[in-house]
Image (tube, grey):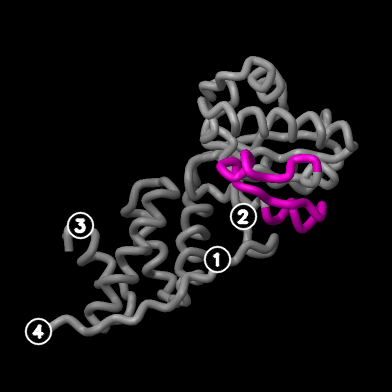
Amino acid sequence: MAEQLSFPLPVLEALGRDDFFVSPANAEAVAMIEGWQCWPSRKLVLIGPRGAGKTHLAHVWAALSNAQIIAADHLADANIPALALGHVAVEDADKIAGTRRKEDALFHLHNLTLAEGNSLLLTATTPANRWPLALPDLASRVQGTPYTTLREPDDALLTAVLMKLMADRQLSPSPSVLSYLTRRIDRSFEAARDVVERLDAMALSSGRPITRALAAKLLDNPDA
C-alpha cells in the first residue's frame, strides 16, 4: 500500500514551570532554580544530558528572575555590558571551550554580571572541571561555581517526558502506549526524544494513530 502524504504539525515546546515534572531525578535542581535568590555568590551551573530539561529550567528561571537567555555561541558578538545589567542565563556554556573570543566574552560577562549585583546561570552537559577551557581565569571562576545536576530519568520521569514530548507534537497516545514505551526503551532522554520523533513520523506516513501495536512495530523493527 502506498504511503500516505504526511503534513507534520509544528513542534511547540511548552516551557512553563507547570509543564516541568518533578521527580527524585531532578528535584534538587528544581529546588535550586526556584530558590535562586539564595545561590552562593549569585551563580549556578546546571548540568545534565541533552534533553534533560536544562533549557526548560533556564526558561523557568528567566520567568522567575526576569533574566535574559543567550546561547554561549552568541556571546562573542553580544553587548556584554548591556547583558550584565540584568540577570543572565547562558546556555551550553561548555561548548565554547577552546574558542578564545567566546571564552573572553563569558569571562567578562561573569565578572560584570556579579559586579552589577545580578545573578548568572550557566547550563552544560558536563561539570566545569571537564571543560577544556584555554583561559585560566575563566576556568577558575566556573570551577568555583556551585552546581546542580539533572540525572537520567527514573520510570516516573521518563513517562512524564514521553508525555510532554507527545504533547509538544500535539499527539494524544493512550496511557498504555506510554507505559509500554517506558518499559521498552533505554532509560534516557535521548531515547525518549528519538522514539517519539520516529513514532510521529510512522503515524503520519501510515495514517494510523499512535497505539501500542504501532509502538511495538517500531521497537521490533527499529529501521522501519
Question: Alpha-carbon neighbours of circle 2 within 10 Å: few (<14), some, or many (≥20)?
Answer: some
**Residue 55: percent from left, percent from top:** 60, 51
| Residue at position x 82%, y 29% in the image | 40
The answer to whether 169 is drawn above or below residue 113 in the figure is below
The residue under label 2 is which amino acid type? Answer: His
- Whether residue 94 can be seen here: yes
Question: Which is more N-terminal, label 2 or label 3?
Answer: 2
Which numbered tag is attached to residue 1?
Answer: 4
| Label 2 secondary element | helix
Magenta residues, as a range? 59-81
Q: CA distance from mark 4 to mark 1?
A: 34 Å
Residue 34 or 70: which is nearer the viewer?
Answer: 70
Instruction: Report x, y in % for residue 46.
Output: 64, 38
> Do the residues bearing badges 4 and 3 touch, measured as CB atoms within 8 Å?
no
Q: Earlier in the sequence, mark 4 or mark 1?
A: 4
**Residue 33 placement, left or right of 97:** right
Tell me whether the residue at label 2 lies in contact with that at label 4, contact meaning CB atoms closer than 8 angstroms.
no
Q: Which residue is mark 1?
A: 13
Q: Position of residue 187 (x, y in %)?
A: 40, 46
Q: Amino acid at mark 1?
A: Glu
Residue positioned 77% across, 45% down in the render? 83
**Label 3 belongs to which residue?**
222
- Closer to the camera, 169 or 143? 143
Closer to the N terminus: mark 1 or mark 2? Answer: 1
Can residue 77 be found in the magenta stretch? yes
Magenta stretch encompasses residue 64 = yes
Q: Main secondary structure of the magenta part?
A: helix
Instruction: State if disc 2 and disc 3 touch (CB < 8 Å).
Output: no
In this picture, residue 30 sits left or right of residue 204: right
- Residue at numbered disc 2: 56
Determine the CA span between mark 3 and mark 1.
26 Å
Query: Against 82, is 6 above or below?
Result: below
